[in-house]
Amino acid sequence: MNVSPTNETITVPPGDGGRSIDDLIASVSASRLTAFLQCRLRFYFRYLLGLAKPKSPALHVGSSVHAVLKYWNRSRWRSEEPGLRQLHDIYSQSWAREQEGEPVQWEGEEDEEKKAGWRLLETYFRESPIKPDEKPEAVEVTVEANLASHGLPRLVGIIDLVRPGGRIVDFKTTGKTPDPEQVAHLTDFQTTGYAILYREAVGKTESAIELHHLVKTKNPKLVVTALGPATETQQTRLFRAMESYVAGLRRQDWVPSPGLQCASCEFFAECRHGRGIN
Amino acid sequence: MAVKLIANYAKRLGLPGYSSHQFSVSVETELHDVTDIAGESQRLYESLQKAVDDQMQQTGFVPPDGYGMNGNGNGHGNGNRPQNGDAGISEKQLDLISRIVRENNANKAEIENMAVQMFGGGVRTLNRMQASNLIDELFEKYPRRNGNGNDRSTYQRQPARA
């Protein structure tokens, strides 16, 4: 299939594992929205064509760490306090399960990565601001908001944790110590999306949004960035971005965005060799 | 033969509360001097722009802060209105919980206790987000059993939707 950047005459059927434009317009998550805004051609490869790529080690570590944090957070509902050994078992099970259906592109470093992921968790359990008896308002909850009255797709998302008092928490694993100002900017759509979803599902405004970065440096550390409730300006900006997303998909705008991000793009080869571009 | 010049001027301006308004004016005029297309275009542009700008200063209704959010009466229209206030557990979520109870011969009191343990209130007091999380727990508690396809794909998942 050929796709031109303007692509006025070509219809794009979903490929193997891909999704239709109508489906992608019906609902959108903040991460899919961000993917579209970062590079439309990458979005096309990933979502329209559904090209399968091996999972990156970093993503696999993140998924396994998230699984343990979910277990740990949910255990507080039952007033349980799992020990490190139990949590390590959960981590190992998740590590194996997460790559059953989705192979990971290991380059001989699986053991090291696994250890690094566990060290992150140990650090988190040691330094977390969350007390063992703190009952969550929600744990890894699926939420959605119908924005049809704004002429927009349904906004969907999964919130990692809501702490008492409406403190939305998102867990992130990263290899670099985050700068608070940059992080607030880079995660703007995501955090604003969570705020909208929370308000719709709970009927009140969140008190704060916390980003818990588990930093995979030589000496792992936890960096918590607390942001205030999403503002009207942030909400408007997100809605504008969603509007741009819909318009871009409708006109099948798959222009690439060459830049520094290409170095880590899983579709670099396809893009470089012109697949999908006239 | 008459030569026509067709001009259109359109403008869209953003307004607070994720709203915008737009207006356009089109004219079709006969061109008397075909050597002066540029001059006539300029005159039309200035004239149309002024006409549009004059009108667009009247913004009409501008949504106040929070309009369209938190169920303030703008009508989400998904047929999924909750019964315990705008953010209360939805009928669809209640139906799904009832179905899980029914199909697994589960003890209603036990599920009420789960809701109390997790959120400090019974099922009908939950908001949509809490109800979504309770349903997650029920899916874990009553996983797929061979033969009856009792899993997430069987039950239509009901997230905390507005």
Image (cartoon, helix red, strand yellow):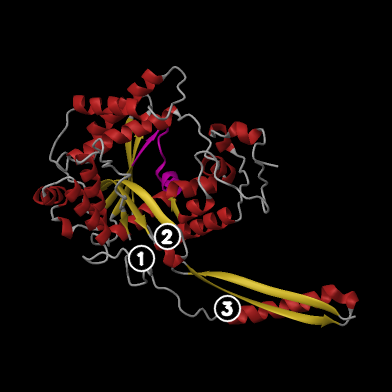
* SS state under label 1: loop
* Residue position for label 2: A235
- Vertical comparison of B94 with B52: above or below: above
Q: Is residue A163 visible?
A: no
Q: Position of residue A40 (x, y in %)?
A: 57, 46
Task: Pick the quarter of the image with the N terminus of chain A.
Answer: top right
- Vertical comparison of B52 with B157: above or below: below
Q: What segment carries the magenta color? A: A171-187
Q: Is residue A243 visible?
A: yes
Q: Please, which chain is the residue tagged with disc 2 on?
A: A
* Residue type (three-letter) at the residue carrying disc 1: Met
Residues packed near mark 2 inside 10 Å, few (<14), some (14 to 19) or many (20 plus) = many
| Residue ranking furthest to the top | A108
Query: Residue drawn 74% across and 75% down?
Result: B7
Residues packed near mark 1 inside 10 Å, few (<14), some (14 to 19) or many (20 plus) = many
Please check whether the numbered discs 2 and 1 fall on a single chain. no
Does the CB distance between marks 2 and 1 fall below 8 Å? yes
Residues packed near mark 3 inside 10 Å, few (<14), some (14 to 19) or many (20 plus) = some
* Residue type (three-letter) at the residue carrying disc 2: Gln
Report the Cα–Cα distance between label 3 and label 2: 24 Å
Query: Residue drawn 33% across and 65% down?
Result: B79
Q: Position of residue A167 (x, y in %)?
A: 27, 51
Is A189 positioned to the left or the right of A210 in the image? right
Residue B69 is marked as: 1
Is B9 positioned to the left or the right of A122 in the image? right
- Residue A177 is a magenta residue: yes
Query: Residue drawn 89% across and 76% down?
Result: B34
Q: Position of residue B152 (x, y in %)?
A: 30, 44
* Residue type (three-letter) at the residue carrying disc 3: Met
